[in-house]
Amino acid sequence: MDISRIYAITLAAAIFVVLLVQTGRIIVKAFSLTAWRYFVKHVCYPLVLLRRRGTTQLTRLDCLSLLLCIGVTIACMSVRVEDRQTLSKRCANFFALNLILLYNSGRSNFLVDKILRVRREKYELFHRWMGRVAVIEGCVHGIISVTTKPSLATTLGIPLLALLPALDVLSALPLRRRFYEIFLKVHTALSLVILIFLWIHVQPVIRLSSLSLLLSSALWTLQILISVAYSLYRNRGWHGTAVVVSGSYTYPRANAYWIDLNRPWKAQPGQYIYITVPKAAGNYLGLLQAHPYLIAWTKGGEDEDTSILILVEERRGFSSILDSCINRSTLLHGPFGHAPDLGRYDKVALVASGIGIAGQLLQVRKLLEDRAKTQARVQRISLVWMLDHDDQEYLMRDCIYELVASPGADVLNVLLYQPYVQEDQTAVAPETPGRRIFRFTRPIRGGSEALGGSQRSTFDSAA
């Protein structure tokens, strides 16, 4: 065969293979993108139960994940069970294995937050449900053991059978929501007592249950040690701590506080801290309380922040006495949490209501900073703030001014919606292109006005 024909056939075959591969990649990409969009739209985002105070929003994906975990547990416990002794032993092993996940928990969990980067509310959801499964497993094992070996009832059987359901009952939503601080301390104390009783109950031999119990105890101890060491590092000991220096921006049910940092760090969007004021109640009982607050704004240099701002909505308990703790020593624990990366989107819209603005401002600032460094592709940012009170805007006015004055803020529009409508109000012409803050009015409930009702006036001429 002629060399030219061989070359032509080889070239045609190569082109055909390239076209085939590229076509396959396009088909796979289109199918995977369509499948992912369908999965996100119909599984990840739809809510099964709306969030109530003290609970977590339950999506379809959460339900499927919980059902899968519970279904696998039931299947593994029921397969090839010949008698009650086999069921009891299997429940004991599964109970001990679940303890590894349950005792490696807590509000300030470094493994979950820093390494696995699992959102706290999702982990707490699975912690509650896996805890209920573990309680059932432990009770089944205990009931079978006590009925087959009555001697166990007088030693550890009855106490453990009483403690496990008590731990579950005291974690019920009404009690947890109404007496959260008491619930937290009682929950920790009962968990410690159960762990001690289990060590007494388990025989000192190398088997699955004893190894699981050893790992649970080790992880819990390690987590406590890391938490204490991190607090000592962040606060430079127990006494030279951060100080609440300002609570001057005070409006109905909302306060803004600046906190100086003894050891500066660079705060990221979505991060929160736990605050402890040792002498909040006039004695050192305040050390027993730690309350989470989202970091709303920061001051400092480019690489680290020296002060942070938190917004507090006044309710019962700690938030009602925080205003009297100005200039008192304050312990900070954290930061924890993280926010999704929005820099890969062209247009970003952030919506907040009331003091929920605390979760959006740092995100906007990071987007503007990344865009100035050509690390984000965002071309338009819209920040919508639905105010709960007509004067609430003054809580964050300086922060918003700083945002609109920052480099690259020409892509930012800030829309403020006031809650009250005055009868003599008239519409005002839109702002000039150089100004990026707009204020609108809306009715409190319903009404003929749409969400973006008449534009009332500019936020401030200095903007």
Image (cartoon, grey):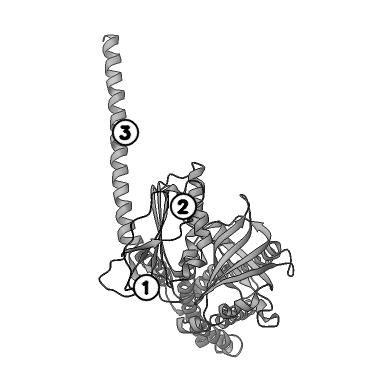
Quarter-of-image position of residue 260: bottom right
Answer few, some or many: residues within 10 Å of disc 1's Cα (few below 14, many 20 plus, some between 14 and 19): some
Answer few, some or many: residues within 10 Å of disc 2's Cα (few below 14, many 20 plus, some between 14 and 19): few
Q: Nearer the viewer, residue 240 or 385?
A: 385
- Mark 1 or mark 2: which is in front? 1
Location of residue 359 in the rendering, given as x and y in whole percent from the top left corner: 48, 63
The residue beneath circle 2 is 341
| Disc nearer the start of the sequence (2/3) | 3
For residue 420, the mark is 1
Location of residue 352 in the rendering, given as x and y in whole percent from the top left corner: 42, 64
At x 38%, y 47%, the residue is 346
The answer to whether the residue labelled 2 contacts the one labelled 3, judged by CB atoms less than 8 Å apart, is: no
Question: Helix, strand, or loop for circle 1?
Answer: loop
Location of residue 219 in the rendering, given as x and y in whole percent from the top left corner: 62, 66
Looking at the picture, which amino acid does disc 1 mark? Answer: Tyr
Depicted 121 relative to depicted 30: above or below: below
